[in-house]
Image (cartoon, rainbow, N blue to C red):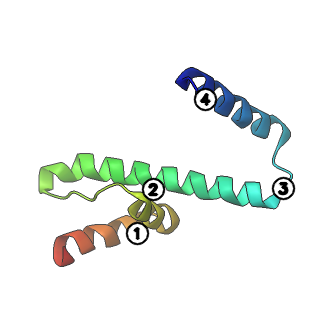
C-alpha cells in the first residue's frame, strides 16, 4: 500500500474513535498503552537533547519508552542512573 493511503486510513480510524469513543475496553486499554509509549518516547527524546550537553544518552526503544511512559519522570531518572552507573 502507498504510505498516503495508510496514513489516511489511520487518520480516519483516529477521528472515528475521537468522535464516537471507544466502546470496547480492550481497545481503550491498548490506546492508553500506546499513548504512554509515545509520551515515554517524547520524555527520552527531550532527555537526549538536553542530556547531550552532559554526556547522557538513553536509547529510545520499546522497553525504555515503556519504563519512562509508565513511571514518568522518576522512570526517566532511573534510566539515567542505570545508564551512568551500570552500563
Left or right of residue 3: residue 55: left
Q: In terms of secondary structure, where does tag 4 sit?
A: helix
CA separation, marks 1 and 3?
Answer: 30 Å
The mark nearer the N terminus, 4 or 2, is: 4
Which residue shows up at 60% across the image and 59% down it?
33
From the image, tell me which residue sits under label 2. Answer: 40
30, above or below 12, in the image: below
For label 2, count other residues whose C-alpha is less than 10 Å away and answer few (under 14), some (14-19) or many (20+): many
CA separation, marks 4 and 1?
Answer: 33 Å
Q: In terms of secondary structure, where does tag 1 sit?
A: helix
From the image, tell me which residue sits under label 3. Answer: 24
From the image, tell me which residue sits under label 4. Answer: 6
32, above or below 49, in the image: below
Left or right of residue 3: residue 58: left
Q: In terms of secondary structure, where does tag 3 sit?
A: loop
The mark nearer the N terminus, 4 or 1, is: 4
Labelled disc at residue 75: 1
Return the x and y of residue 32 as percentages of the image width and height.
65, 56
Residue 81, by quadrant, is bottom left
Front of the two marks 2 and 3:
3
Question: Badges 2 and 1: C-beta atoms under 8 Å apart?
Answer: yes
CA separation, marks 2 and 1?
Answer: 9 Å
The mark nearer the N terminus, 1 or 3, is: 3
Front of the two marks 1 and 3:
3
Front of the two marks 4 and 3:
4
Task: Pick the residue in front: 70 or 27.
Answer: 27
Amino acid at each position: 500500500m502507498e504510505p498516503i493511503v495508510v496514513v489516511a486510513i489511520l487518520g480516519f480510524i483516529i477521528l472515528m474513535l475521537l468522535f464516537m469513543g471507544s466502546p470496547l475496553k480492550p481497545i481503550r486499554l491498548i490506546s492508553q498503552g500506546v499513548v504512554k509509549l509515545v509520551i515515554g518516547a517524547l520524555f527520552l527524546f527531550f532527555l537526549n537533547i538536553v542530556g547531550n550537553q552532559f554526556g547522557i544518552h538513553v536509547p529510545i526503544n520499546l522497553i525504555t519508552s515503556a519504563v519512562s511512559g509508565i513511571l514518568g519522570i522518576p522512570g526517566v531518572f532511573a534510566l539515567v542512573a542505570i545508564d551512568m552507573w551500570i552500563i
